[in-house]
Image (spheres, helix red, strand yellow):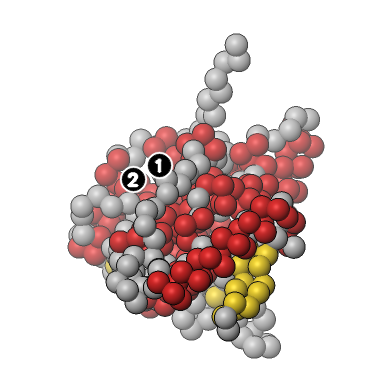
Amino acid sequence: MPNGIWKIDKRYKGERIQESTGTCDREEAEQYLIHRLEQLRQEKVYGVRPVIQWQEAATRYLIEFQNQPSIWLTAIYLEQLDSYIGDLPLARIDDRSLAPYIKDKLQGGASNRTVNIALERVIRILNLCARKWRDDNSKPWLDTVPMIAKLDEKRASRKPYPLSWEEQSLLFAELPDHLRRMALYKVNTGCREQEVCKLRWEWEIAVPELGTSVFLIPAEFGGRREQSGVKNRDERLVVLNDVARRVIDGQRGLHPSLVFPYGNPDQFGPTAVHRMNDSAWRKARVRSAAKWEEIHKTPAHPGFASIRIHDLKHTFGRRLRAAGVTEEDRKALLGHKNGSITSHYSAAELDQLIDAANKVSATDSRAPALTILKRRQG
């Protein structure tokens, strides 16, 4: 009885039944067992459609769509769901059966968006069961797909938090050296986390007319997984301002292919950083928030105390806007889709983008300030 829920483990006419009853009430569980035995009898005698469990449908989905770029992520969510609904019949997958999973994930700190991603996988599989997959008698695995409610993401989503220059200084001072260099590069280029972690020298392109270089990340770049691809499925132009250029120059010679390697070259050789959001990052933000409180005698802003890796990209974007950089140039610098072909910039256009990026490369009071607007308390 895991989690107090009764499970069936019984043999019926040579066939073993192993599934959850979905209830903690013994009498209700016994009634469900009687119901299942009758279903099995009708299957054998009258050829009634067999009851298919969620686990079978989830397994078929992973096999049938194994070449999907995000199938590895789907597998993670389906593995998490398995202990909650894995042995339930498809017809019993609904809001009620999913409620324990949702509750545990939210209590564990998952966001509404994270939970909804899992629920979207459930809905997708149930749709296939009802509309595509058939049993030996050409009947659909599921008659109807239930209305599964998703969580409200707008109210629960955390707002982006752009760093002030002082907050950046406090945070970066607490980071280990390799992570500080990556963060400094990220906050000056607006790159996504994996575009920094897996940056390669072969993507660097010299621009001799300007005495500098840029990076052109290929559209097929896979991030953590080879097939996951860049966000917009386009090449990503990365323009380097003066600070980012100094970071890149400091990385030369550390590794033949990786710009930001990690590890001791005297042992197994440096490897790529899997992610920036690691324990070192989380410990650094705790220390930097404490340092802020020590200096200012007031708690740090909640956004700073829980600063995320992606907030460095938001910081770059907000600083560009504060410096008066045009929306078109901001999109180009941030790698947003704007209809232009990033690999076809002229030297003059690149010079303009570099100049725009340099407007936020300062680290003193002359840089454009960001003001956090607070709603007046009634």
**Viewer can see residue 276:** no
Could you say where residue 216 lies in the image, as x and y percent from the top left? 33, 67
Q: Residue at x 44, y 74 (%)?
A: 45
Q: Is residue 318 left or right of residue 232?
A: right
Q: Residue at x 58, y 84 (%)?
A: 14
Point out the tag, 1 or 2, that comes first from the N-terminus. Answer: 1
Amino acid found under the numbered disc labelled 2? Arg
Q: Is residue 260 left or right of residue 189?
A: right
Most distant residue in the top direction = 378
Q: Residues within 10 Å of mark 1 (few under 14, many from 20)?
A: many
Q: Nearer the viewer, residue 376 or 209?
A: 376
Q: Quadrant of residue 183?
A: bottom right
> How many badges with numbers are in the image?
2
Amino acid found under the numbered disc labelled 1? Leu
Q: Which residue is mark 2?
A: 330
Quarter in which the C terminus is drawn: top right
Q: Nearer the viewer, residue 9 or 244?
A: 9
Q: Which residue is mark 1?
A: 320
The answer to whether marks 1 and 2 mark residues whose Cβ atoms lie closer than 8 Å is: yes
The local secondary structure at tag 1 comes to helix
Quarter in which the N terminus is drawn: bottom right
Q: Nearer the viewer, residue 224 or 347?
A: 224
Q: Residue at x 25, y 50 (%)?
A: 338
Q: Quadrant of residue 50?
A: bottom left
**Viewer can see residue 157:** yes
Q: Residues within 10 Å of mark 2 (few under 14, many from 20)?
A: many
Could you say where residue 73 lies in the image, as x and y percent from the top left? 49, 66
Q: Is residue 327 left or right of residue 90?
A: left
The local secondary structure at tag 2 comes to helix
